[in-house]
Amino acid sequence: MIIPLLRIALISKHENTCNFYKDMLSRRENIILETYAGTDELKRGCREKVYAGLIVDMWTHIVSANADKEFVYTLDKIFPILYIGDSKQKPSQLDPAGGWLMARQHEIKILEDFIQNQCRNMKRRGIRSEMRKNLFFNIQAQFGGQEKSFKTNTKNISQNGCFIISVNELPCGTPICLTFTDLHDKTPIAAEIRWSKPWGNDFLSLPGMGVVFKEISLAQQQALAEFLK
C-alpha cells in the first residue's frame, strides 16, 4: 500500500525543539517536517507547497506579535494544529525536547494521534502568504437574495480576501457579494466564505467570516494594493 506524503510545518524559534521533532518524524515513512522560526519565515517558505497540518510551539506563539497570532488563528480554521509545550515553562537547553509536551514517553502518543487521525485524513492545502492589513472598510454584504443583506466592516484585508465582522453563521463555500462603499469602484465583489468564527466563541476577538475574492475588477485590485502599502 502506498502511504500518501504528509508535509507538516513546525513553528518554533528554539533549535532544540525543532531538532527533537525532526528526529522523531524522520523515523516515519513519507513525512516531511519543515521547521520555521516564525510566521514570516513560514510565509516565505510555504509558496507552492501543500500541507496536511501544523505544529506550533506555544512559547514561540505567546511571545509573538499580535499579527502573527492572528495569522496562526486563521490557519487553525483550515488545518489541524498541534500546540506543543507549556507556555509557563521556558525551553531548557538540557532537555532534548525543549522542556515541552512531547518530552515524556506517554505524551508521544499525542503526536501519533495527531498524524494518524487528523493529518492523514486532511485534504492538503496551501498556506496564504500574501500581505494582510487591519483595515476597517465599510461594506454591504449580500447572500442568498436581496433580503439577506447586512451592513458591516472588514477587520483585515489582503489582495485576495478579507475578514468581515458578522454574527451570521454561514457554512464554508457559501457565495457572498461584497460592496465596498469606500472604494471609487463600487461594483459588488463576488466572494466565497472559507471559514468562520461564531459569535460567543470567546471575548478576545470579533465574530465573523474569512472570505476569498472570486471576481474583482482591476480598478478594485489596484485600489486595495495602494491601501496595503
Image: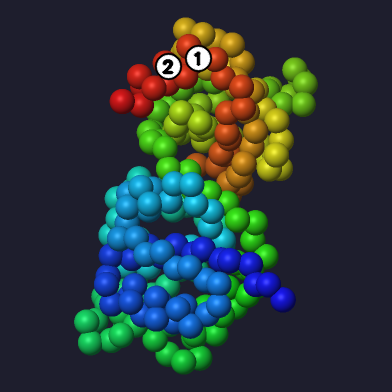
Against 150, residue 164 (above or below) is: below
User: Callout 2: 10 Å neighbours few (<14), some, many (20+)?
Assistant: few
View extreme (front): residue: 2
Say how many tags the image has.
Answer: 2
Q: Nearer the viewer, residue 91 or 115?
A: 115
* Residue 227 x/y as whole percent: 36, 22
Looking at the picture, which amino acid does disc 1 mark?
Leu
- Quarter occupied by residue 101: bottom left
**Res. 175 in view:** yes
* Residue 148 x/y as whole percent: 73, 24
Q: Secondary structure at mark 2?
A: helix
Residue under pointer 1? 218
* Residue 223 x/y as whole percent: 42, 16
Q: Nearer the viewer, residue 5 or 83?
A: 5
Against 141, residue 128 (above or below) is: below
97 relative to 120 in the view: left or right: left
User: Callout 1: 10 Å neighbours few (<14), some, many (20+)?
Assistant: few
Point 22% across, 82% down: residue: 93
Q: Nearer the viewer, residue 71 or 54?
A: 54
Point 51% across, 35% down: residue: 163
120 relative to 30 in the view: left or right: right
- Quarter occupied by residue 16: bottom left
**Res. 56 in view:** no
Q: Label 2 near label 1: C-beta < 8 Å?
A: yes
Point 39% across, 81% down: residue: 23
View extreme (left): residue: 93
Find the distance from the CA under tag 1 to the CA under tag 2.
Answer: 6 Å
* Residue 186 x/y as whole percent: 55, 10
Quadrant position of the N terminus in the picture: bottom right
Q: Which mark is residue 222?
A: 2
